[in-house]
Each structure stands twice: as structure tokens, then as C-alpha cells.
């Protein structure tokens, strides 16, 4: 029998497509691993660039890689990273095998890179779960490739108006992301009237989480990001406000109100500069839980993580334990001790977040040095006008908690103006643009330091600490 | 504005006039109208129709000082047309109109004020999707040196009419443009007290902030 050459060579079309897909996946994944290895060898981060590489090689690669893993997405304006770290602790303590994107690589290319790094060359994920922090504007696009099983929305606040234009754009992006994952269980902050408004347009199963009473005895004066009912534009009434626009909201005209929750903080029992203790309800049971980070904003992060735990079916005692044992992530209230001086770094990026930091700082015991580092690169937000919506005027009432305020970063000049017009005496203000001089100054004085940098300023300063004092690099 | 008056020993009282609250324009010297979100425009329009529009027009004609930013600026014009063709009628105090577009004009920008206002270079931040076109006789607030301004086409920024200063600049506008701030205050003081001189303030921080952004925007072009 003579085999016809053409019949041997004729491959069925489906096989050809699958083979092409597999080859392209292999090349893309390999390229990612090689480029990240190379970039890290030369000390250049290599977090997002490899992702750009593979998306160029094979644009659909993320869809292929995300197919055989269960994905948990954490999105929203504030608290994504801390919430993701808290969920990670639960996963670890449950013995669940997962990978997570770290270090703020939360847009399409960074996420693509992480999926590739954690897949075999054949495109199989090495883990059962993918825990993905996803930028809220990028979620719209990322969700076209990654269909998730669990989505956690932390909150919606006004943030980086240069990127988002308006707050409704943020809601729309998250909404589209959810609609692209119709099977996902969605955890939503019941205290956030903006987040809750999304449920009218989705068919997903929803778990609501929230706080049931005030957190702070004394709060800064805040501009609410959502004073008017999103449905009928009447001004909301509140049974209680936790902060910003969050709390027991109610529209007196159309009846739109805070929904009931299955995961809730029933009582805030204790707030210290390092931790909070709460009475936490998980479905039908109440527990006393310690949260290993301070401040009201971390209470919200904790219950968002707890809601995710409930969605995932993690045992209650594991969820509760994880909140007390996890360690605060990269930049978010990280402590460096240099020359015996404690330097605590708290990331700031928008009025709501910064106001919470001020709330927290007014409860410190010992007079401290405040250092604010304001950059306006893309990742920091190019529009710095948000500093004028933070209640820095409150600093004049806590003068005894402040030794001085130092200001640094690209837009230090604007920042010091903010403090001057807030009423801080000029003698207490200093502009120090050079980071080496700044760091020398911080460690040559006596008071503990609270440093509030925007994102890229935090990276730059952290790199200085790392180079000069040997702290671990940010991608570990 | 309040601080720069108080630091000179000039008493200033700030009142917030909210939705649903009426006011008598004769009781005030300086009016500030800020920006807002497109979503909230509908709430605004209803309130303007309760008599506020007339109060504002009368105040402007009687040379009261106004500083209006972005949405506050737009509503002084004749109308606003959205990108899909819906038109909403505005106060008509100044002769201009605005057309909304899908692309937003966002970024740091700089413009030069008219010589009559002092000719100073103002640095700010714009974030708007509306393109404003001034009527024939309406003077712009300034000439764009970097960025878009009113529409990104004709190099005009904002509008000036009697004692109205209208601009797209967020920023915030006043802190790092202290000479502009003082000029605006002077128009109000002159109207009330005729003989006015504002003592100079220690403005090192302000001028540093201004020159930093001026250099960034206007050199290396």
C-alpha cells in the first residue's frame, strides 16, 4: 500500500488550531519566564514588562491560562491590596494551593505575567486558585479574558480623577467586570451606596458585608463622594456614618437603603494604634476577632476578606484566626526601624484614605514626626487637587501629637502650601526634596515617624531604605 | 481667599449656600461656584430655576466678584449640549456655550492672564469634556500657553466679564497663583471700599510652587 503524501500531511482543522494555540501559549509563557528572570537579574523589577511581552506575542494567552484555575478577584477603590493579603492568609491556613499577584501589578499586563509565571509551558496552572488584585478601571478589560468564580468589591470612592474622569465610570467598569463573570459569587460592601447600586443589573449570587455602628468617636470633616441618591438624586439620610459616604444610608424619597448583611461587624470593641478588636458575625454566628492592622479602613478590609472566606466555604475559625495572624502588606503600614527610630509607612492616594490615616494618627500616644511625600506620576494620580479635600485642618487640633511636618516628593511645593493654608504654623513646616537628606534627618531626630507617601514615592523611598539599610526587595 | 484676607487683618465670613437654600445677592461681596460631576447636573438645574439664576445674573451685572470653576463656569453660559445632542439651557449671564465630547481634556496646564488683570502666568489642572466657545464680545480670562483651555482649538482659556473670573482650572487654582488670588480679592474690595491696597504677604512657598510647575510646563517644549 502506498500512502498518499497529501493524506499523511492533511491534519484535521481542529487539531491544527489546538496545536497552534498550544505552541503560541508555550512561546508566550516561555518568553514571560525568561524576560522576568532577566529583568530581575539586572534589578529592574520585571513585574509588568513580561506581561506586555506575552500579550504582544499571543493576545489571547490570558484567556487560555485562566481557563483551568478558579479565580478570586479583589477590586474597588481603596483596600484592594490589604484585603487580598488577608484573603491570602485564609487560603494559606486552609491549606489551599493558590498563587497571587503581588506588588501592585494589578492591571492587564501585570496580571497576564503572573498567570504565565504560575503556569507550565503547556499552559496548565500549577495551582487550584488564582488570587488576583485587579485595578477597578482595568477590571472591565481583564474580565474579558479571566472569568472569575469569586469577586470582592471593597468600595467605590473618588480617586485619581485624571484616570477615571468621574466616579460613575468606576462603577461602570466594575459592573462590566461582574457581568463578564455571570457565575461568580460577588461580595459587596453594603455600607457603600455606590457599590450596592450595581446589584440591579447583575444576576450573580451576592454576599453583603458591612459595619453596624459608628467606628470613630470623633471624625474629621469629610466631603462625601456620594451625597445624593444614585437612583433619584435626593439627599441621603444616615442612621450612622462610619466614614466618608459609608454607613447606614437611606433615601427618604425612593426608599433605596443599605441592605442586610450576612457578614458584619456588630460591635467595635477596641481600637489601638496597632490593632482593632471587633465582634464579627459570619452568617449566623458571632465571634470576637482581632484584626492585625489598625484603623477603620482595615476593619472594612477585614470583613471584605471574611466575606470572601464565607464565599469560598472556608471554616469560620480559620477566617477569624487569619485576621489576627496575617502581616500587613508592602507599604501599607509597614514599619522600618533604623537607628532605633520607628518609621511607619502608610500609603495615601485619595481623600477618603488619607482622612482615615488622620483619624488614626489623632489617636497616637507619643508626639511624632509626619512626613508626606507627594508625587504626581501616572500611578500616583496626576491630579493632586485631592489634597485639598483632605481634612488637614484637623492637624491644628492635634498640635501636641506633631513635632514637625516635613514634605517631600515631586509636588512637595504644593503639599507644603496645603499645610500652610490648613493653618499649620510655618515654623513646623519643612520642605526636603532630596531623599538622602530627608532620611538622614529622620533618623537623626528622636520622635517616631509616620510617613505618608503616594505610590511611586513609596517605591522610591523603599528602594533607598533597601539599598542603604538592607531591607528586603519589594517583589519578595 | 479667606486666609489671605484674615492674614491682612481683614475680616471675612464664608457662607455655604446649598441646594434648596435661597439667598439675597446684595448680602455678599464674593461668590465662588465650584465644579461637579455630570451626573449631578440635573440636581443643579432644578435649583437654579427656583430663583438662583436671577440672583446670580443680577449680582454679575452689578459687578459683584465671581470666581467660577469648570461646571460652575459652564453654567453661567447660554447652554450646554451633550455629545449625543441633548441641550440644556443655562443661566445666560455670559455669552458663550459649551459642547460635551467623549474625550476628556485632562492635565496640568498654564495660561497667561490679560495685561489688564496683571499679566501673570497661571498654572492649574484641567479635567473637562466640555468644549467652550466664547461669544464675539466676550473676553477670555487668559491665553493658553500649555494644555487645552476652553476648547483646545483657539488658545482661549476661561472668560472675563465685569468682575467675573471663570476658568477650567482646578489645581487648586488659587494657592499657587497668589497674585491672581490677590487681584480677585482687590476687585471685591475696590467695589466696596474704593481706596484699596493689599499689603504684601510672605509668599515664598506659593511662588516656589508656581515656578516649579511653570518650569515643568513651559520649558523643554
Image (cartoon, coloured by chain):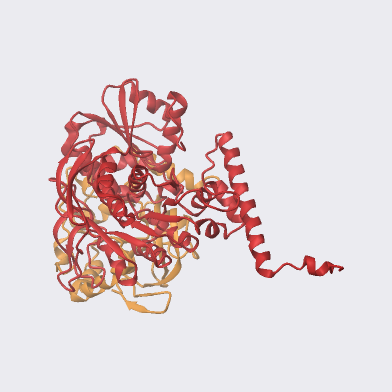
Chain colours: A red, B orange
Residue A291 at least partly seen = yes
The residue shown at (64%, 51%) is: A27
Above or below, B159 relative to A406: below
Is the residue A377 above or below the residue A201 in the image?
above
| Viewer-proximal residue among A363 and A94 | A94
Q: In this view, does B136 lie to the left or right of A248?
A: right
Left or right of A424: which side holds B95? right
Residue A264 or A456: which is nearer the viewer? A264
Q: Position of residue B137 (x, y in %)?
A: 40, 71
Residue that sits furthest to the right in the current view:
A2
Q: Can residue B221 be seen in this view?
A: no
Picture coordinates of residue B160, whole percent (x, y): 35, 63
Residue A155: % across, % down: 30, 56
Residue B151 horizontal/vertical position (percent): 45, 65
Above or below: residue B210 compared with residue A23: above
On the rendered structure, is A235 left or right of A313?
left
Q: How many labels does the image show?
A: 0
Query: Of all residues shown, which one is farthest toward the front?
Result: A1
Q: Could you tell whether A130 is left or right of A363 in the image?
A: right
Q: Is B169 or A314 nearer to us in this picture?
A: A314
Instruction: Quadrant for residue A16, please give it.
Output: bottom right
Q: Split into 4 quadrants, where in the image is the N terminus of chain A?
A: bottom right
Give the residue drawn at x 40%, y 67%: A182
Residue B191 quadrant: bottom left
Please, is residue A419 above or below residue A315 in the view?
above
Kindly identify the residue that appears in the image at 40 percent across and 43 percent down: A455
* Nearer to me, A170 or A377: A170
Amino acid at each position: 500500500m502506498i500512502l498518499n503524501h497529501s493524506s499523511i500531511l492533511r491534519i484535521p482543522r481542529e487539531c491544527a488550531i489546538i496545536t497552534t494555540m498550544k505552541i503560541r501559549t508555550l512561546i508566550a509563557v516561555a518568553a514571560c519566564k525568561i524576560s522576568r528572570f532577566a529583568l530581575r537579574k539586572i534589578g529592574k523589577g520585571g513585574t509588568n514588562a513580561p506581561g506586555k511581552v506575552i500579550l504582544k506575542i499571543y493576545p489571547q494567552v490570558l484567556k487560555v491560562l485562566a481557563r483551568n484555575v478558579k479565580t478570586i478577584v479583589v477590586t474597588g477603590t481603596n483596600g484592594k491590596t490589604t484585603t487580598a493579603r488577608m484573603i491570602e492568609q485564609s487560603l494559606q491556613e486552609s491549606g489551599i494551593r493558590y498563587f497571587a499577584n503581588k506588588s501592585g501589578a494589578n492591571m492587564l499586563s501585570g496580571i497576564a505575567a503572573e498567570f504565565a509565571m504560575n503556569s507550565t509551558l503547556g499552559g496548565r496552572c500549577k495551582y487550584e486558585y488564582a488570587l488576583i488584585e485587579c485595578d477597578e478601571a482595568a477590571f472591565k478589560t481583564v474580565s474579558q479574558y479571566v472569568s472569575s468564580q469569586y469577586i470582592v468589591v471593597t468600595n467605590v470612592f473618588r480617586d485619581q480623577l485624571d484616570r477615571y474622569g468621574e466616579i460613575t465610570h468606576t462603577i461602570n467598569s466594575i459592573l462590566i467586570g461582574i457581568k463578564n463573570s455571570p457565575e461568580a459569587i460577588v461580595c459587596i460592601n453594603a455600607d457603600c451606596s455606590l457599590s450596592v447600586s450595581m446589584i440591579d443589573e447583575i444576576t450573580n449570587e451576592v454576599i453583603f458585608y458591612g459595619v453596624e455602628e459608628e467606628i470613630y468617636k470623633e471624625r474629621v470633616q469629610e466631603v462625601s463622594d456620594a451625597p445624593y441618591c444614585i437612583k433619584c438624586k435626593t439627599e441621603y439620610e444616615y442612621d450612622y456614618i462610619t466614614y466618608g459616604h459609608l454607613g447606614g444610608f437611606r433615601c427618604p424619597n425612593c426608599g433605596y437603603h443599605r441592605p442586610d448583611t450576612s457578614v458584619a461587624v456588630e460591635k467595635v470593641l477596641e481600637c489601638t494604634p496597632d490593632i482593632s478588636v471587633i465582634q464579627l458575625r459570619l452568617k449566623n454566628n458571632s465571634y470576637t476577632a482581632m484584626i492585625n492592622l489598625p484603623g477603620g479602613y482595615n476593619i472594612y478590609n477585614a470583613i471584605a476578606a471574611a466575606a470572601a472566606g464565607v464565599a469560598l466555604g472556608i471554616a469560620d475559625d480559620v477566617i477569624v484566626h487569619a485576621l489576627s495572624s496575617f502581616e500587613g502588606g508592602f507599604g501599607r503600614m509597614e514599619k522600618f526601624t533604623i537607628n532605633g527610630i520607628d518609621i511607619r509607612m502608610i500609603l495615601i492616594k485619595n481623600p477618603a484614605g488619607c482622612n482615615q490615616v488622620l483619624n488614626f494618627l489623632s489617636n497616637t500616644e507619643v508626639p511624632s514626626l509626619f512626613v508626606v511625600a507627594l508625587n504626581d506620576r501616572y500611578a500616583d494620580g496626576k491630579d493632586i487637587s485631592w489634597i485639598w479635600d483632605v481634612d488637614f485642618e484637623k492637624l491644628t487640633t492635634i498640635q501636641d501629637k506633631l513635632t514637625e511636618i516635613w514634605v517631600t516628593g515631586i509636588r512637595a511645593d504644593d503639599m507644603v502650601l496645603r499645610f500652610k493654608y490648613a493653618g499649620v504654623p510655618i515654623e513646623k513646616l519643612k520642605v526636603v526634596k532630596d531623599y538622602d537628606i530627608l532620611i538622614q534627618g529622620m533618623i537623626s531626630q528622636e520622635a517616631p515617624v509616620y510617613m505618608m507617601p503616594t505610590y511611586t514615592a513609596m517605591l522610591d523611598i523603599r528602594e533607598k531604605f533597601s539599598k542603604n539599610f538592607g531591607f528586603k526587595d519589594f517583589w519578595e | 481667599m479667606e486666609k489671605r484676607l484674615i492674614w491682612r487683618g481683614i475680616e471675612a465670613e464664608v457662607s455655604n449656600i446649598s441646594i434648596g437654600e435661597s439667598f439675597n445677592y446684595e448680602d455678599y461681596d464674593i461668590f465662588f461656584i465650584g465644579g461637579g460631576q455630570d451626573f449631578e447636573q440635573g440636581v443643579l438645574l432644578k435649583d437654579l430655576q427656583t430663583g438662583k439664576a436671577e440672583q446670580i445674573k443680577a449680582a454679575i451685572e452689578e459687578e459683584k466678584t465671581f470666581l467660577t470653576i469648570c461646571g460652575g463656569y459652564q453654567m453661567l453660559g447660554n447652554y450646554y449640549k451633550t455629545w449625543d445632542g441633548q441641550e440644556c439651557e443655562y443661566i445666560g449671564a455670559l455669552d458663550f456655550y459649551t459642547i460635551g465630547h467623549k474625550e476628556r481634556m485632562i492635565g496640568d496646564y498654564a495660561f497667561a492672564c490679560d495685561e489688564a488683570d496683571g499679566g501673570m502666568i497661571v498654572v492649574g489642572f484641567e479635567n473637562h469634556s466640555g468644549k467652550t466657545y466664547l461669544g464675539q464680545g466676550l473676553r477670555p480670562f487668559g491665553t493658553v500657553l500649555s494644555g487645552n483651555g476652553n476648547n483646545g482649538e483657539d488658545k482661549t482659556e476661561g472668560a472675563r466679564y465685569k468682575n467675573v473670573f471663570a476658568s477650567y482650572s482646578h489645581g487648586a487654582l488659587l494657592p499657587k497663583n497668589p497674585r491672581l488670588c490677590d487681584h480677585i480679592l482687590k476687585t471685591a474690595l475696590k467695589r466696596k471700599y474704593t481706596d484699596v491696597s493689599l499689603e504684601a504677604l510672605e509668599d515664598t512657598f506659593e511662588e516656589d510652587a508656581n515656578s516649579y510647575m511653570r518650569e515643568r510646563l513651559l520649558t523643554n517644549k
